[in-house]
Image (cartoon, rainbow, N blue to C red):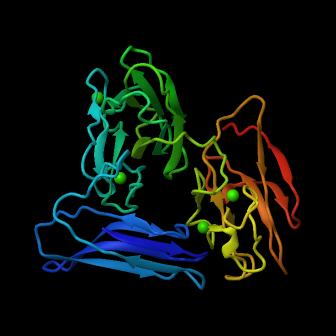
Amino acid sequence: MFWYHMFGATVGSLRMSIYDISSNHITSMWQRQGSQGNEWHMAQSHVQLTEVHQILIEASVGGLSGHIAVDDLSVTKGACAPTEGICDFEEGDCGWIQQTDDDLDWIRVSGNNVQSKSRPGFDHTTNTTNGYFFYVESAPTHVQGHTARMTSPLLQTGDAKCLQLWYYMEGQGTGTLNVYQQFSDKDRPLLVTQSGEQGGLWRFAQTPLTVSGSNYRIVVEGITGQTEQGVIALDDVQFSDYPCTASGQCDFEVNFCSWMNLLEEDDADWLRAQAGTGNHTRPSVDHTTNTSTGYYLYMDSSVGTWGDTAMILSEIFTPDSRGHCFTFWYHMYGYNVGTLKLYKNNRYKTMAKKNIFYEYVHGSQFMETILSQDRP
Ligand SMILES: [Ca+2]
Ligand SMILES: [Ca+2]
Ligand SMILES: [Ca+2]
Ligand SMILES: [Ca+2]
């Protein structure tokens, strides 16, 4: 276990590996890339090796701006203490049970023992090929519409207000992921549903849980699609005491909500920081609280080269016949400040094929726009 602090526009990456002394072999156990916020985070990894080994902590520099710090490293015997309310599937199935009245099972695997071509190479927790997740694979005896269901341990109504999870759906003809809240009295509302290819990255989903009624289990259902290439995977399921934030909404006071920095497609990261900690070109108060203690996201344009980009990506919004209104507040100030762009991205395509939806160059007033339908 150790604590780490990674912050900056071009912060680079941090990796923990196991070095097997006798075979000279290095195995990655945990990895983070890009800014992780201006705060300390804990990382832990359960290492089970029979050979004598050492732990390597490796930082690589991403550019001119940023730092990586580690502190309070410790090694204790036995498994890591579970974090309450979170199941990362690293130590086991967390008491989730495979159903037998269906066609297939969810299988707990790590990236390096999945055979299927379309697959998450990395899990979401550790970001390495050694981290575990659950997935449904329909090959080799593919039949469209076959289901795999697994259920959570029994939960007391009101224990959790929000269910958060990360899913991965990739491959031509990927099927459907459904998440239900199955009450003891047979009522079974559908909480989350996604179908088809979702762009080959871990996606965030969250849903409010009904807090009255009988006790319940969460049911996660994978349904195979048109072809055997499709894969559906699940990781980092969390039951939260706090209500879910509204879909797409974020004031950045606590974290990034469901927004995430892109790591491969751009040059730098958006940084989340307290207003009062900045230099003269950053706003001295945030918009939510109008105080210097409020938080916002910013891009540090004083580093890097002209034309560098930093992108954050939202969760997926389901089409609505009335459309969606997307509203945000922005502040652009300074000499040669650059450009702020808003894109509507078709989730079936890569970011390289994104459509420019709205572009604004300079100013600091309120901006409001209507997002059109995003049907495949
Ligand atoms: Ca995991
Ligand atoms: Ca089954
Ligand atoms: Ca704020
Ligand atoms: Ca980035």
Q: Residue at x 34, y 61 (%)?
A: 129
Q: What is the total number of numbered labels drawn onto the structure image?
A: 0
Residue 295, percent from left and from top: 66, 62
Which residue is most to the bottom? 64
Horizontal arrangement in the rendering, residue 317 relative to residue 99 (left or right): right
Q: Residue at x 83, y 73 (%)?
A: 333
Horizontal arrangement in the rendering, residue 157 relative to residue 364 (left or right): left
Residue 186, percent from left and from top: 39, 14
Q: Nearer the viewer, residue 335 or 38?
A: 38
Which residue is most to the top? 185
Residue 329, percent from left and from top: 79, 56
Confirm whether residue 196 shows in the render.
no
Q: Residue at x 45, y 81 (%)?
A: 60
Horizontal arrangement in the rendering, residue 126 relative to residue 361 (left or right): left
Q: Nearer the viewer, residue 316 or 228?
A: 316
Which image quadrant for residue 185? top left
Q: Residue at x 50, y 73 (%)?
A: 6
Confirm whether residue 118 shows in the render.
yes
Q: Nearer the viewer, residue 369 or 233?
A: 369
Q: Quadrant of the N terminus?
A: bottom left
Residue 239, percent from left and from top: 42, 41
- Vertical order, 171 against 330 (above or below): above
Q: Quadrant of the C terminus?
A: top right
Q: Nearer the viewer, residue 180 or 264?
A: 180
Horizontal arrangement in the rendering, residue 293 relative to residue 102 (left or right): right
Q: Quadrant of ligand 3?
A: bottom right
- Vertical order, 317 against 71 (above or below): above
